[in-house]
Image (cartoon, rainbow, N blue to C red):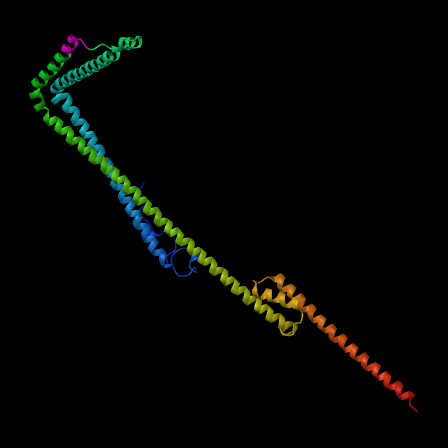
Amino acid sequence: SLLPSPASCPSGGAEFEWRAGEGSSEEEDAGPLDDRVEGAIDAINAARDAMNARQLDLEAAKRKLGAAEAQTAVEITRLREHEHRDNLAQVEKYESLKQRAAEARAAAEARAAGGEDAASSGSGGTAASEATTAATPMAPTPAELAAVEAMEAQSLRMACDLSDVFISLVPYFTYVGVAEQSLDDARAAVGAAQAAVRAARRDYHTSMDNLEQISLDIQRAQAEERRRAEDESAAAAAQSAWEALLAATDVSEEAMSVPAAQAALAVAREARVETERLEAAAALIEGAEEAQRQKAISDAVAAAKRHMRAARGGAAGAAEAP
């Protein structure tokens, strides 16, 4: 079947909406058109046109062959049944007689050869040789040979008598030979056209595969670009969340003393935006801050106790002095 011509397809690319300014609204922001796509689509259109042309050539060759076969059959039938019917009948009788004479001669020669072999093998006089001689056909008799020679002579005389018939049949045999050669040429043309169609189909499928590969390359590149953009967006969002978290808690990054909190926030900053990780990091920061406050309070209480003990020791010494 023929594929639609490029004229029936808008811009030759209705099957692939990748041209700049074309396609659905979702594809308008897909970026610039890959340079390879335009050439691949043009290659598909050219291969499709070539395949359609080769298919038309094949159909024309088949029509030509069918017409030649029909015309040759009609003409040969007319020549055989009307114009050269009597002459062909005489030639057919001659060919039949010649065939019978040839078969009779072959049979006589075979029998003669068999008789000679039997005679040579039976010269020993043994029972086995006698049995072999009895089973072997006898050599043809002189009467049989004479009959064969008479048949051959009759065939030769008929051939001489049909010399004028053979001459009158020259146009017939010439036409048959030329017609058969023309049919052979037409059949060869059909075979060549079929080979050309197969080659054009391979070229078309190859161009389609090429465009499909380009499409896969584009899709992989776009997916990689989307992943890169998402990673950058996630990193930026994590950094913003980190800075906002530091500002809200009034704790600098350098002041973080809990390794687990620092590691959790570093992972959250490098990964995509994940609320659970940010909340877990915030909880660790709050724990670290609370631990720092508790430690500061504990240190202050310990210092106060030391001062109190020192003060009490000084007061007791003063009371014991004279």
Instruction: Locate residue 21, reporting x and y percent.
Output: 38, 59
- Would you place residue 122 above or below residue 195 in this image? above
Residue 7 visible in this rendered orientation of the protein: no
Residue 52 visible in this rendered orientation of the protein: yes
Q: For residue 79, which quarter of the picture?
A: top left
**196 left or right of 16 in image:** left
- Would you place residue 232 above or below residue 106 in this image? below
Farthest residue to the bottom: give it.
322
Residue drawn at (47%, 59%), measured in percent from left and top?
224
Please give the range of residues in magenta: 140-147
Q: For residue 99, which quarter of the picture?
A: top left
**146 left or right of 188 in image:** left
Instruction: Locate residue 123, reporting x and y percent.
Output: 24, 10
Instruction: Locate residue 296, reporting x and y percent.
Output: 73, 75
Residue 144: in magenta span: yes
- Would you place residue 278 above or below residue 166 in this image? below
Residue drawn at (42%, 55%), measured in percent from left and top?
217
Residue 317: in magenta span: no
Instruction: Locate residue 284, reporting x and y percent.
Output: 67, 66
Q: How many marks?
A: 0
Q: Can you say which quadrant of the picture contains the C terminus?
A: bottom right
- Would you place residue 22 above or below residue 298 in this image? above
Residue drawn at (62%, 62%), measured in percent from left and top?
277
Judge by depth and name the residue closer to the eye, 212 or 165. Answer: 165
Residue drawn at (10%, 24%), measured in percent from left and top?
169
**245 left or right of 90 in image:** right
Q: Can you say which quadrant of the picture contains the N terminus?
A: top left
- Principal secondary structure, stretch drawn in magenta: helix
